[in-house]
Amino acid sequence: MAALAGANVIYGAGMTESGVTFDCAQLVMDDEWAAMIKQVIGGVRVDAEMLMLDDIKKVGPFGDFLSLESTYRFMRAQSNPRIADRRVREEWQADGATDAYARAHARALEILETHKPEPLDPDIARQVHEIVERADRERGVA
């Protein structure tokens, strides 16, 4: 609701206990929720493709829109969570019945083990180094 009212800052991602503790799994969950918020404030695309008028005419009143390829494609584009599990209970239980925190924790470990950040451009790295050195000198640290 705050995002729809114009707030554009999400504070505290990954924080628990009023910011006393940082939790990587909480950060993964917060990232997913932030993506959902971003999707909502991005609005709803309205054009000929999205309106699916040809499909509506083809299916007709009381028809089955859920089985249409276009419905499935647009549904997946709208929301594709990695942490929130929307499967039916039987599928969730058969797959180990993990909760959102356990899935987020596993994803956080995966990111920590496999992520390879892009290196900084050498000019940018030099500028950052100069800024830190200047700040250290100004504050008597160096």
Image (cartoon, grey):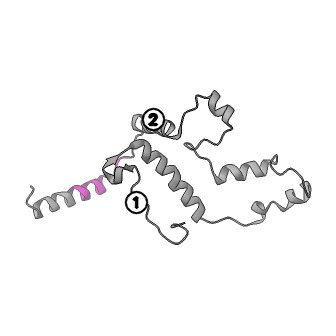
Q: Quadrant of residue 130?
A: bottom left
Q: Position of residue 19 (x, y in %)?
A: 33, 53
* The label number, if any, that marks residue 11 in the structure image: 1
Q: Is residue 121 visible?
A: no
Q: Is residue 131 left or right of residue 81?
A: left
Q: Position of residue 16 (x, y in %)?
A: 37, 49
Q: Position of residue 122 (x, y in %)?
A: 30, 52
In the rendered image, which residue does mark 2 sit on?
A: 110
Q: Nearer the viewer, residue 126 or 4?
A: 4
Q: Residues within 10 Å of mark 1 (few under 14, many from 20)?
A: few
Three-letter code for the amino acid on which mark 1 is drawn: Tyr
Whether residue 81 is situated above or below residue 54 in the rendered picture: above
Q: Is residue 65 visible?
A: yes
Q: Is residue 61 left or right of residue 46?
A: right
Q: How would you classify the magenta stretch by its main secondary structure?
A: helix
Q: Nearer the viewer, residue 38 or 137?
A: 38
Q: Residue at x 86, y 50 (%)?
A: 64
Q: Is residue 6 magenta?
A: no
Three-letter code for the amino acid on which mark 2 is drawn: Glu
Q: Is residue 127 magenta?
A: yes
On the rendered image, what quadrant is the N terminus found in? bottom right
Distance (Cα) linking label 2 and label 1: 24 Å
Q: Position of residue 22 (x, y in %)?
A: 34, 46
Dot 2 and dot 1 residues touching (CB under 8 Å): no
Residue extent of the magenta highlight = 117-129
Q: Residue at x 46, y 45 (%)?
A: 28
Mark sitting earlier along the chain (2/1): 1
Whether residue 41 is situated above or below residue 17 in the rendered picture: below
SS class, disc 1: loop
